[in-house]
Image: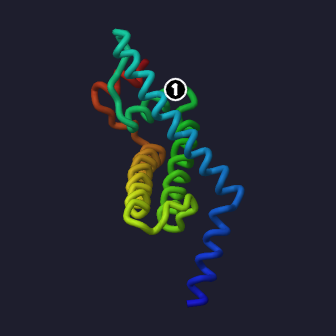
Amino acid sequence: MATIQANANSVKQAAANPGLELLERLGYVVRGALYAVMGVLALRIAMSKPDGQAVDLTGSVVFLIANPFGKFVLLVIIVGLAAYSVWGLIRAIFDPLHRGSDPSGYLERLGFISSAVSYAAIAGSASAWASSSRPIALSSSETSMARR
């Protein structure tokens, strides 16, 4: 029992590491940027602009990497979303936000796990795109969006 307690304390200390905190903040920035791109593209639809697109988070990634700095942006997205996923798991397992052990706290923590898995899947897709020597396979709407 003492070993488990010592391991839990060491993980909690690692979670409070300033380097990890910086990566967590990068994750929040990347996540915010993806939602901002989604919002701007949706706003362009509402304003009847011809280049407005209805996209999800993956479409936002495609939009962001379709520029001269695409590989660098893709790398930042991968690191940021992976860090955000790790932070989600830390929030779910160690409860640093003190959501509690009651049913509502467990539901919130289950939401953190769901979020971590979702963002890890997007980061995994992005890393598959980064490691592929082939161009990214896009749908026709994503292709037209990436050309803009």
Residue 18 horizontal side relative to residue 72, left or right: right
Q: Quadrant of residue 46?
A: top left
Measured as percent of width and height from the top left, residue 30 is found at 54, 39
Measured as percent of width and height from the top left, residue 110 is found at 39, 60
Q: Quadrant of the N terminus?
A: bottom right
Measured as percent of width and height from the top left, residue 122 is found at 41, 47
Residue at the spot 34% in from the left edge and 22% down from the top edge = 53
Label 1: state its secondary structure. loop
Q: Estimate how packed mark 1 is, as few (under 14), some (14 to 19) or many (20 or more) residues with alpha carbons within 10 Å.
A: some
Q: Residue most toward the bottom?
A: 1
Q: Quadrant of residue 107?
A: bottom left
Q: Quadrant of the C terminus?
A: top left
Residue at the spot 41% in from the left edge and 25% down from the top edge = 146
Residue at the spot 56% in from the left edge and 84% down from the top edge = 4
Report the colour scheme.
Answer: rainbow
Q: Which residue is mark 1?
A: 67
Amino acid type, label 1: Asn
Front in this rendered view, residue 1 or 61: 1
96 lies above or below 71: below
Q: Residue most toward the left?
A: 140
Front in this rendered view, residue 137 or 87: 87
85 lies above or below 101: above
Residue at the spot 43% in from the left edge and 44% down from the top edge = 129
Residue 18 horizontal side relative to residue 77, left or right: right
Measured as percent of width and height from the top left, residue 140 is found at 28, 26
148 lies above or below 96: above
Q: Disc count in the image? A: 1
Front in this rendered view, residue 9 or 61: 9
Residue 11 horizontal side relative to residue 139, left or right: right
